[in-house]
Image: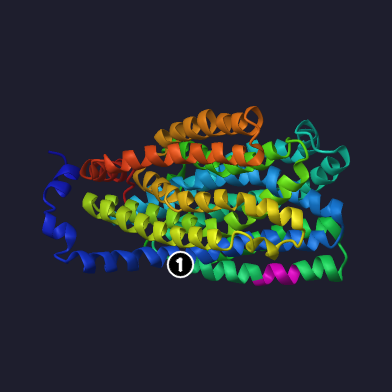
Amino acid sequence: MEKGELRVAFLGEDELDGGMGLGRRTWEESKKLWRIVAPAIFSRVVSYSMNVITQAFAGHLGDLELAAISIANTVVVGFNFGLMLGMASALETLCGQAFGAKKYHMLGIYMQRSWIVLFLCAVLLLPMYFFATPILILMGQPTELAAVAGKVSIWFIPLHFSFVFLFPLQRFLQSQLKNSINAYVSAIAMIVHIFVSWLFVSKLQFGLIGTAVTLNFSWWVAAVLQFLYVSCGGCPHSWHGFSMEAFAGLWEFLKLSAASGVMLCLENWYYRILILLTGNLKNAEIAVDALSICMSINGWELMIPLAFFAGTGVRVANELGAGNGKGARFATIVSALTSFVIGLFFCILIMALHDKFAFIFTTSTVVLEAVDHLSIMLAFTILLNSVQPVLSGVAVGSGWQAMVAYVNIGSYYLIGVPVGVLMGWLFHFGVLGIWGGMIGGTAVQTLILAFMTIRCDWDKEAMKAISRVENWDVPT
């Protein structure tokens, strides 16, 4: 019997449960979970708000400027954001399991490997910024809008490279239960962003380019502050400075990062397709307005389940790395139930306020009626999205990214999108049919992930995690 198997075999039921009753265990697990989730919710809401602030300042410059900054940020930056965020999520598996196994020195090595892999990826993605104008024209955007958005996209290149360093730093700290640092840094970056946006756009009149520069600056402030915390003694056990060991084992690291990138970017892009499809309907203006309002509400609320995605990934990875398969299973159950209850609350709230919540965005009677018509879909989406990210978090914490990438391709793009197109155009249900079909794809993916989680042999996953940590270990 190997070393990893011995560690799991000798952990009895009493030791795994800590000798506590169900209520006490649930309370202790909830405290560990919310220690990660609460700061993660705050950080995600702040990051989301920084983009909204940038769009608000651009909106005061003119309609063309607002549309250009929105297209550049959503399509060009958004595509690369989703891919690089997903690739950085490989650290949630590796750092989380290494932290659970008390191999603290490996966390800094993993983060440096992630910087190398993401930097190479960022360089390969640069043509999207340089050729943004022709790409947007090919996607059907008006020539004038594509030209301005393409010009702005060039100025977003510094923001693009900030992802290389910021995303791994966030996951490095998160895996060590230092998510509060991410929250503090996000708050500082938000304050800086508001000030520099006022300075560059309102006071110095730098126009549209000024809005892009402010977003670049604010994200780099966050990256620099986090690195200063790490390198100046905030993580003495896990950061020992730069090491040439970071260049070892890059191929295996790249494979896991690529699988993570594909898995998460497929989810990140999915509902962006919904707006693109709706824009091709007849008389789409009202439908797009109504759908944009629903997606804005969904986007704000989605920050909560995405925080549970992060929390679940860390908790599962920590427990598996410690050889505690049953602890990982229990963490999954607590996280899923907590997120579902919160999602159910917001689902009921949306259904109760189905004809009122759109007043936040508009007073147009036609748009209000269209939003009311779509509110039931929004409620179901919120409820479904309260469970699906938790299951994706289990996949990340366990290292199932490659398998789940195939699940996402099949569920989203072979079922959800085609069914949505059929319902929208062939059966003439319009935006309601497109959205319904895509919800069906999410439901299929959720059911498959739930089946995988329920059928999981957690002790076997714990042995795999221990084996991964030991195989990738570098002597202290």
Displayed quadrant of residue 299: bottom right
Quarter of the rendering occupied by the N terminus: top left
Q: Position of residue 66 (x, y in %)?
A: 80, 54
Judge whether residue 262 is colored magenta: no
- Confirm whether residue 299 shows in the render: yes
Q: In the figure, is residue 445 to the left or right of 116?
A: left
| Colour option used | rainbow
Q: Is residue 224 visible?
A: no
The residue type indicated by label 1 comes to Ala
Label 1, secondary structure: give it.
Answer: helix
From what the image shows, is residue 283 above or below residue 334?
above
In this rendering, position of residue 353 left or right of residue 149:
left
Residue 233 place in picture, x, y as percent: 45, 69
Percent coordinates x, y for residue 220 in the rendering: 64, 60
Q: Could you say where residue 241 lies in the image, as x and y percent from the top left?
A: 46, 58
Tell me what residue is drawn at x 73 percent, y 50 percent. 289
> Count of labels shown?
1
Q: Quadrant of residue 287?
A: top right
- Pointer 1 residue: 38
The residue lying toward the viewer, choosing from 232 and 310, is: 310
* Magenta segment: 191-196
Magenta stretch prevailing secondary structure: helix
Q: Nearer the viewer, residue 221 or 397?
A: 397
Q: Is residue 194 magenta?
A: yes
Crowding around mark 1 (Cα neighbors within 10 Å: few <14, some 14 to 19, many 20+) is some
Along the line of sight, the residue nearer the viewer: 447 or 191:
447
